[in-house]
Image (cartoon, rainbow, N blue to C red):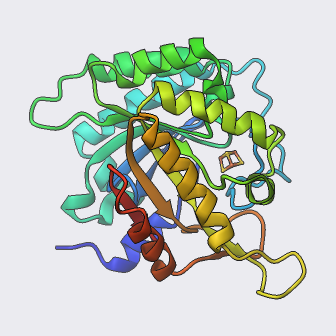
Amino acid sequence: MAAPMATVASLHSDHSRLFTLAGRPFRSVYPVLSRRSGGISVGINLNLDKGCNFDCIYCQVDRTVPGMEEKNFPLLESVMEEIGLLFQSVDSGEFFGDTVFGSLSPEFRVVKDIAFSGDGEPTLAPSFLEVSRAVRQFLSGRDWTGGTPPLLRLITNGSGLFSRETRLRTREIFLQEDPGEIWLKLDAADRERFAFINRSRISFERMMQGLDQVVADLPVTIQTMILDYGNPGEQGSFTAGRDLWDPLLERVSDWSRKGAQIRAWHLYSVARPPAVTGVRKVSADRLEAWAREAAALPFPVIVFP
Ligand code: SF4
């Protein structure tokens, strides 16, 4: 029997990092039901300290509450133990029996990906390459007979990939031989809106120069969050309009013309309440109209309103 829509909808809007299995609270691994993955996404949080060089206006991480002191925390061991326990529980059926995911209908009862995401920028975590390599080995070492192995996915603002060495290692771990993807954030392609939306410590010029290198070297799926803020006409309000969209389309088209391997472009809006109040979801119509304008690009432009 299909899961009640309210359950699917509530799970889509609940991306809590708090997960408990058989009474054991997890620290660094958290499964969620993901719209964009199309099933269960197993998140890995390498930023228990909530460290990020962006401060996106739509971020769900509440940084008014300090993160954890990571210095002596065995992150690699924690991630690998929790990943092992989670997949054991999927194999035994306990995962879809005793957890919040128990009410899902069969089409959602599949682990689609293991995603490096979490409470900050994963590529900035000192253990990023070490942990992602270990998780890749874990996936490669399992018997997936009768099922499809989950993708290994990196969800990133790209800044840690400005290092050529990190790009090479990331390619080896995420993209060679076994299935994997890199989802790259590009919310604005002009200085003013980049400052408003991403509130980054990195300058706009450095960011665009770095992303130019990332897309030249790595196949990516581009992720663009489109939102409004405040009430139209009020001081400080923001409406996603042509001044946001035109530079975005121009930048992505330029990357494409220069030979970037862009697999897809996701246009999405707010699904869960951000930490900042006043951020508003935009209509599906607006996203779909812009996706139609981008239809000539040689990759799919997909809308997640
Ligand atoms: S890059 Fe991600 S974690 Fe960092 S502030 Fe933006 S949404 Fe939050």
- Residue 42 spot, x, y in % from top left: 43, 42
- Tell me which residue sits at (48%, 22%) in the image: 132
Residue 49 appears in the picture as rendered: no
In the image, is 111 to the left or to the right of 246? left
- Tell me which residue sits at (49%, 14%) in the image: 168
In the image, is 199 to the left or to the right of 175? right
Q: Nearer the viewer, residue 190 or 176?
A: 190
In the image, is 258 to the left or to the right of 211? left
In the image, is 120 to the left or to the right of 29? right
- Residue 8 spot, x, y in % from top left: 37, 70
Q: Nearer the viewer, residue 94 or 266?
A: 266
- Tell me which residue sits at (41%, 15%) in the image: 172
Q: Looking at the picture, does residue 164 appear above or below residue 154?
A: above
- Check the picture and name the quadrant holding the N terminus: bottom left
Q: Quadrant of residue 114?
A: top left
Q: Looking at the picture, does residue 185 appear above or below residue 210?
A: below
Q: Quadrant of residue 302?
A: bottom left
- Residue 49 spot, x, y in % from top left: 76, 35
- Residue 163 spot, x, y in % from top left: 64, 18
